[in-house]
Every structure is written in structure tokens, then in C-alpha cells.
Image (cartoon, helix red, strand yellow):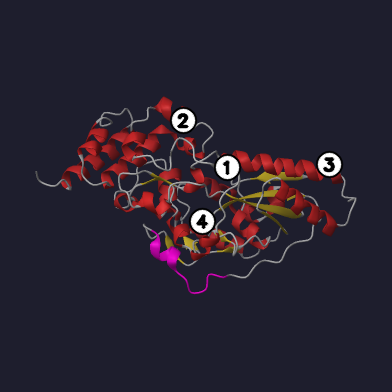
Amino acid sequence: MSTNLPCTPDELAARIRSWGRALGFTSIGISGIELGEAETRLMQWLAAGRHGQMHYMERHGAARARPADLVPGTLSVISARMAYWPEAQDAQVVLDDPDAAYISRYALGRDYHKVLRARLQSLADRIESVVGPFGYRAFTDSAPVMEVEIARRAALGWRGKHTLLIHRDAGSLFFLGELFTTLPLPVDAPQPDHCGTCTRCIDVCPTGAIVAPYQVDARLCVSYLTIELDGAIPEALRPLIGNRIYGCDDCQLACPWNRHAQVALEPDFAVRNGLDRATLAELFAWTEEEFDRRLAGSAIRRIGHVRWLRNIAVALGNAPPSAAARNALTARADHPSELVREHVAWALARQHSTESPT
């Protein structure tokens, strides 16, 4: 693979930024491959067991913090950002309606993995058309990559106290993707932290998952509980989940920097299936065939129908007592999955225990 560039590294970096914007990325940054103290923090987090059932993080271990170990020959990383906030029903309005189903805004449209991976490949193809064959590998939350730390070092933002990346002009409502490359590109200077004394993200977390500034215990996080966890949701945490059936946006909704968040221009991130306005009862009634068909091409589909029902059962148990909620739950009381039956039984008990005497 050629390393003789037809232009200076600075000129190539400028072209890459321009090509990235033309492909729909909000911003492009470039970092080196030394992640320094990030590796120490990662190993401490894993040793504390805060990754829960996400065993893939433990399997890859330190390789997550060593790009050249993950992709031999890597010299620089091109980091890309793409806004995802859709035109949708106001998030807080949905959260305040206990009969409504809250789905994290990033998942209301098409699976972002597919969208970003295709754009990153197009960016790599564009680079190759100018510099000739070069080594690269694209990542989009799809491998053991410390993408927030890499993006921070690529000047795409700073790490907020909720551990997500924040940018002064874009908030945190964006996806990240990376191209590990063998190209010797100039790196950007990281931005300073602008969180200051603000603790809104910590204060608003419904389960207390942000255990300290810049530290998240995934085992308590609603996103982990509703997406990554494949077993029973701990009973003590179920009432705290409210009507959130897939992911959680609370820490981002509370962040003052998200007043600058950009609405997504990418049509693939537009709301599908009315998921921004759906009720718990109507989604709970979806058969497995409906679930697979309606959510084809969605990130939600990967949790499967059983976990979908588990999550909605919990939300129905948290809803105000009503005949509609009890009828919906009763219809699933004999579901073939023990996991679903357990959560339905819990939810029905909640519905009956909080039912007003008539």
C-alpha cells in the first residue's frame, strides 16, 4: 500500500474534511493513536464490573485503547460526527405521559450502524481515489473502539460528566464513526472541558447510574437494562424505569449544551412507524411477526421480541392503574417465554396493588 501522498498531509486532511461534509457528516476530526490514561480508566472500570453483561468489552480489554493493536499499521484515526435528533414528538411530553412508550430518540429511525458505515466506506473510497490503496478499517459502535476518547482527541468535543461527547455548537445528540488509517495525517488539538460545575446530567439520571462525574455504572443505566441486559431486570430498578422501553435520553435532555443540538438532515433518521407517539398498549400487542416486519432496518430489532415485551411489561407496571393496561398484560400472561411471564406477573401485581378502590 502506497504511503507516497500526491499532496501534503495538511492538504489531504483539509480535503478529507470537505469530503466528509459532502457525505453528510456534521464534522470531521483527526487524532493520533496514543490514548494515554484512557486505558487505565478503562481497566479500572472493567475491574469494578461496571460493564455488567457486556462481556465483549472485557474480552478485548486493553486492545480497545490501542488502535495499532486492533488494526496493525494504524497511524491516525479519522473521526466523524453526524447529528441524529429527529423531527419528532417532544421528548419530555412523551416522558410525562405514563401511557406513552418512550424510545430513545436515536432509535426512532433507521439503524445508524448501517448509515454511518456506508458513509465511512464512501469516505474511504474517496480518499483512495486520490492517494491510491491504503490501509483502513471503519468502525461505528461495532467493535472494541474507545470512540468517545478518540473523538475527544480529534477535537469533536469534550467528554461530559455523563461520559458522552459534547460539542459547544452541537450538544451531544450525534453519532460517532471512525476510520482507522495507515495515513500519516496531522492531528487536531482537543477542546477544553466546558461542563464547569454543572451536575444536571448526574442529578436527573432516574437510576443514579452516573455514580460520579465522568463515571457510569452500566448495570444501573436504563439503556443497559432495556437494551444490553438479556435476563430479568432487577426488581428494585423496575419502578425507576418509568415508561422508557428502549434506551434513555434523560442526561442529554437535561444538558444545557443541547440547546445547540442540530436537527438531523439525514432522511434515514426520520421517525418510522409512529414510534415517537405510540402507546405502551399498542406496542405490547405487536406479534413477533409484526415486531420483525415493522422494525426491519431498525437498531431496536436486535433486542428481539422477548426483550421488547419484557421492557414494555415493566412500563405498563409503572403506568397508572387502568383496565386497558391490565387487559394488555393479561393477554401476555401465558406467553411462552418465562422472562416475559415473570415481568407480566410483576406488572399485573403493580397494577392491582395501586388500583383505586371502586
Q: Residue furthest bottom?
A: 197
The correct choice, above or below, for 32 with respect to 119 in the image is below
* Of marks 4 and 1, the one in the foreground: 1
Q: Position of residue 56 (x, y in %)?
A: 54, 45
Task: Identify the residue under disc 2.
Answer: 294
Residue at the image position 67 percent from the left and 52 percent from the top: 80
Residue numbers of the magenta segment = 194-205
Q: Report if residue 113 is visible in the image.
A: yes
**Residue type highlighted by circle 2:** Arg
Instruction: Confirm or deny contact between disc 1 and disc 2 (CB under 8 A).
Output: no
From the image, tell me which residue sits under label 4: 46
Q: Mark 1 or mark 4, which is nearer the start of the sequence? A: 4
Which residue, given by chain and number where applicable, does mark 1 sit on? Answer: 112
> Are discs 2 and 4 less than 8 Å apart at CB?
no
The three-letter code of the residue at mark 1 reads Tyr
Kindly indicate the quadrant of the structure image that contains residue 136: top right
